Amino acid sequence: MAPQDTSTAVAQPGDLKPGLTGLAEDWSSDQRTFKNVPWGKAMMWIFLLSDTFIFSCFLISYMTVRMSTAVAWPPVSEVFSLSFGGEPIPLILIAIMTFILITSSGTMVLAVNYGYRKDRKKTALLLIITALFGASFVGMQAFEWTKLIVEEGVRPWENPMGASQFGSAFFMITGFHGFHVSVGVLFLVLIARKVWRGDYDIEKKGFFTSRKGNYEIVETMGLYWHFVDLVWVFIFAFFYLW
Amino acid sequence: MSNGVIEDSQVIPAAEVEEVELYHAKSFITKWVFCQDAKVIAIQYSVTAIAIGLVGLVLSWLMRLQLGFPDVFSFIDAESYYQYVTMHGMIMVVYLLTALFLGGFGNYLIPLMVGARDMVFPYMNMLSYWIYLLATLILAASFFVPGGPTGAGWTLYPPQSISEGTPGINGGIILMLVSLAFFIIGFTMGGLNYVVTVLQARTRGMTLMRMPLTVWGIFVATILALLAFPALFVAAIMTLFDKLLGTSFFMPEMLVQGELGPHENGSPLLFQHLFWFFGHPEVYIVALPAFGVVSDIISTHARKNIFGYRMMVWAIVAIGGLSFIVWAHHMYVSGMNPYFGFFFATTTLIIAVPTALKLYNWVLTLYKGNIHLTIPMLFCVAFILTFLNGGITGLFLGNVIVDIPLSDTMFVVAHFHMVMGIAPVLVIFAAIYHWFPKMSGRMLHEGWGQFHFWVTFLGSYLIYFPMHYLGFVGVPRRYFEIGETSFVPESAVALNEFITIMVLIVGFAQVVFIINIIWSVFKGKPSGDNPWNSTTLEWQTATTPPGHGNFGKELPICYRWAYEYSLPGVKADFIPQNLAPDKIK
């Protein structure tokens, strides 16, 4: 064989080289390409990449039908406005929802931090707070859907304000995102429970998987949660602001 | 050793990750049914895929009976003919080829070849199979709903697929779309496992550039699938909404039986873009694992290292990347902006470069090799020829100006069956003949194998070569019957009859193959651990078939690449990847 791999210098955990040299060494090394990255975290990153393609396809499809339709698009800032004592304020609900979701990313970061310090109680508490923020986001989304359906008469197949694709794309995209948030809330609560019980301190095995649990799972959960937030920023920009 | 083997193997890095405890099955059900062992999951995947593939095979017989002998079979009417065409296409492309290459061979070979105990998350891997089985059952159920399966053509283009007049618009199309969505969810669970196992769970000494090309092919194909299936997922959901909720994503305003339909202003072209953004990478999801498998089998059975290993790896990666920017060459006649045609024709021709490079390298691997014409080798040589033929007609169709007259003719059918029907299936056969001894501990019967090979290989040429000609004279694809048409000569009718007879003969040979497998599982000649004297890790296991955890107590250490054949100065004509340098004689 050609002597191409002779200078295999193996990076031990802790002495990873920075920059391009480090990158090249990691990729030409054995065992692991991403050093010190647990399997679950690597898998979450790749899943999120795949999920990015799903949301991109949804958003690009929405833009395409918005361009292809011959009927005028409903005036978005008027549709998504709430009146407090007479004057309608455009996008106020969405602004609050966005603020809450972004805030929940902050509490998630803190949870990860306390998780690595093995501070059981604070981690669990912060996870629960994050879950509550997420749940209130979904709640407000439900309120928004109800208002659109009941008061404004928007349906997936038609609406009184303009192009029917408005309702179709709205319910589909926010619904799919809301589903992601709901799944996230569910798992936040489950992980908070495990943290609270101290499962990760004793590396208790999962029920089905027989894999040991540890605080890295909190970070993996965090990756998902931040992704869901990031997607919301794009939905907010392309659907509500455009 | 004079040529670098020793230097190569000097560094044995320490293990970076402590070994993870495996799930140990306690009952029959957890050991053989709800099993978390990748090897059992692989066999479950393969059996399911082959079973549904046989349904696809029978559908192709029915379809060909109609084309060869119109008006003879009273049970085939236009509706059922379109249902055969549709279900045949979708079953073969997605439920057979994708599932068998990635779910079947991926599950079996990745952990063994990279030296892992199992996939990184065995429980999720198991779920992947069961969701795939569910998807397959939903698809099969569509044969039994009122109205039958969908007859929209395997591309499922709206408005046709969900409009009045197409077979199966009330049950079939819904089940098809739901089944595809489940397939994608199930595949994602498995696919994430394959990618992470390759990236993060290799054994000591197994660098990416020492992996066998089979693993490279499956690895890159899985990445393609993880990025391409989302487009199909979104398209399926939006079509379901158009059908069930009456939205207008894809549906334009249409007159249905004299009345204005419920839809308005949708974009049918959008569906085509989404579908082919999935559909073209799908070609390579099937082809790249085939490329990898062929490289390994050719090298083993020609007792010679693969020519240009690094070039082969980078060609796989380049083809994978390029496959995402060629999709609209399926849409030259769709009415998209003509400038797109220019761009996509160019990228299509560029993708031929790394592909041709691989063909040259296979031929150069054979050149002056010590070729053993075993059954796997025969199938691989047949693959090289077939892929070349199919690839060259692909260059025809990649050019807008040649494609437009040939579009929707039998020429296209002949092209894609050669390049992604026959070619990958030949590789699947090669792979089964090659790895069956590892999976079962027994050889497949050689004589029946010869029969199977020659009938399949020659037969498929007798089917598809005439079909190119039919396309040139203008016989359209997907037509229930041609009838008396001025531009179709008499000879086309005779050719259609000939093709149909050949299809039945080749189909019969596959039945022989299935019988051979079943017979050999019980009565085949015992193979030993390494019947082909192969270098890769899966042949170096302690037991055959490998037990739970693959490698016994100690994981193997990889000292070299996978292609150390016929080395001068070494007694044996191969050096296994895990043989310590001081043990080489």
Image (spheres, coloured by chain):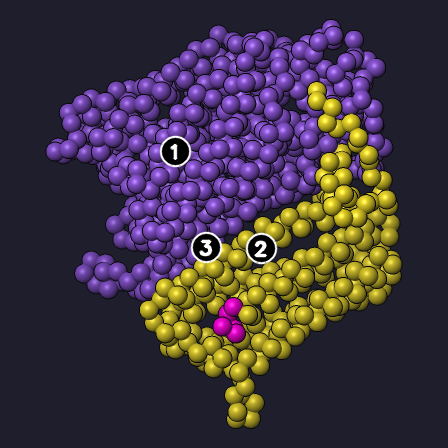
Q: CA distance from mark 3 to mark 1?
A: 31 Å
Shade of chain B as shown in the rendered figure: purple
Q: Position of residue A213 (x, y in %)?
A: 79, 48
Quarter location, residue A5: top right
Question: Going 65% across and 31% down the picture, which residue do you hit?
Answer: B110
Residue on which disc 2 sits: A52
Residue on which disc 1 sits: B394
Quadrant occupied by the N terminus of chain A: top right
Shade of chain A as shown in the rendered figure: yellow
SS under mark 3: helix
Q: Chain of mark 2?
A: A
Dots 2 and 3 on the same chain: no
Reply yes or no: does residue B63 show up in magenta: no
What's drawn in magenta, residue-wise? A238-242
Left or right of A42, for residue A153:
left
Residue on which disc 3 sits: B237
Q: Chain of mark 3?
A: B
Question: Going 12% across and 33% down the picture, which residue do you hit?
Answer: B486
In the rendered structure, which amino acid carries the disc numbered 2? Answer: Thr
Dots 2 and 1 on the same chain: no
Q: Residues within 10 Å of mark 2 (few under 14, many from 20)?
A: some
Left or right of B289, for residue B419:
left
